[in-house]
Amino acid sequence: MRTRLKAVAGNRPAPRREEILKLERISKGFHTAGGYLSVLEDVGFQAESGELVSILGRSGCGKSTLLKIVAGFVSPSSGKVLLNGIPVKGPGPDRCVIFQEDALFPWLTVGENIAFGLKGRKQSRKAKAGEVSRFLNLVGLSEFRDYLPSEISGGMKQRVALARVLILEPEVLLMDEPFASLDAQSREEMQHLLLTLWQELGHTILFVTHDVSEAVILADRTLLMSKNPGRIREDIPVNLPRPRERESAAFAGLSRRLHAALRD
């Protein structure tokens, strides 16, 4: 079951240059039966408001652990995360996470899943319904409002998951390989949708991936991670005009550079 993506009108707002997110010398290790495992070491970077930053690296380099630290789900062994200059001490609605698994409530409809995060918000029922309708339209699922998750495709479930966090208006969107389990066509559709929503809503996004093409098609910058322990090896700007053409020489050239760096 597929539905056509809806283009969102309007140009992306001019980027603001203020720093919104800063990681200072983040390290993380775990005690194991064999001793101590260092997963991340001295990781630091900044992200500006409205910037889309990809974190690219091989499996096991600590990408997901790093995202969980930014989300506040895991505490670093040392270092700190600052959001608008304030240290992150735990999870909060200013940082929302989308994982590879959609994690929808199977007993709730598409619309009810999207509305779930609004339960504690002091709004009228009519206002909440209007917000749900708006985000259903943004992700192209208006006609599927009353469907259950079991009745829609994997790609559509991820659109519901995306709408469910965006309706909360987080300052930073954290995405942990959210499209990895989708087929190639659905994955490209979701990449296009994410870019459309980012241009419309202007969130700051950290996008974890091990797919070079995905990093190049999406990001303003790509942070390339090494492993054992995980470190930021390079901070690579993606200076390609949007919309980006996968068949272009510039796209292919940057992709080759990143592939080669991952092999080193």
Image: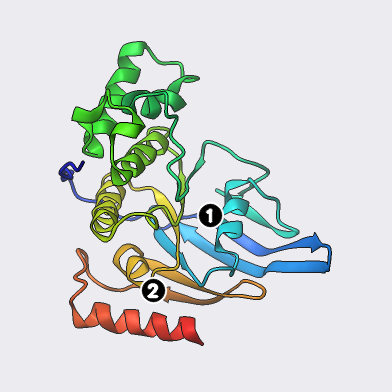
- The disc, 1 or 2, on the residue closer to the chain's N-terminal end is 1
Q: Residue at x 31, y 50 (%)?
A: 198
In the rendered image, the residue lying farthest to the front is 150
Query: Residue 136 at what x, y percent from top left?
Result: 26, 32
Q: Residue at x 33, y 79 (%)?
A: 255
- The local crowd at label 2, few if under 14, some if 14 to 19, many if 20 or more residues have their Cα within 10 Å, is few
Residue at which label 1 appears: 21
- Say what amino acid the circle numbered 2 marks: Pro
Residue 49 seen from this side? no
What type is the residue that disc 1 sits on? Leu
Quadrant of res 140: top left
Mark 1–mark 2 distance (CA, rounded to whole Å): 17 Å
Percent position of residue 203, x then y: 38, 48
Q: Which residue is found at the position 26% from the left and 81% from the top?
A: 252
Label 1 packing within 10 angstroms: few (<14), some (14-19), many (20+)? many
Q: Position of residue 194 (x, y in %)?
A: 30, 51
Q: Is residue 253 above or below residue 245?
A: below
Q: Secondary structure at mark 2?
A: strand
**Of 29 and 204, which appears nearest the observer?**
29
Residue 228 appearing in the image:
yes
Q: Are marks 1 and 2 in contact (CB under 8 Å)?
A: no
Camera-nearest residue between 190 and 120: 190
Name the residue that disc number 2 marks.
Answer: 237
Q: Could you tell me which quadrant the N terminus lies in?
A: top left
Q: Tell me where residue 63 appears, x and y as whole percent.
A: 55, 63
Q: Which mark is residue 8?
A: none
- Which residue is located at x 75 percent, y 68 percent? 37
Helix, strand or loop for disc 1:
strand
In depth, the one of 89 and 4 nearer the eye is 4
Left or right: residue 46 versus residue 6 is right
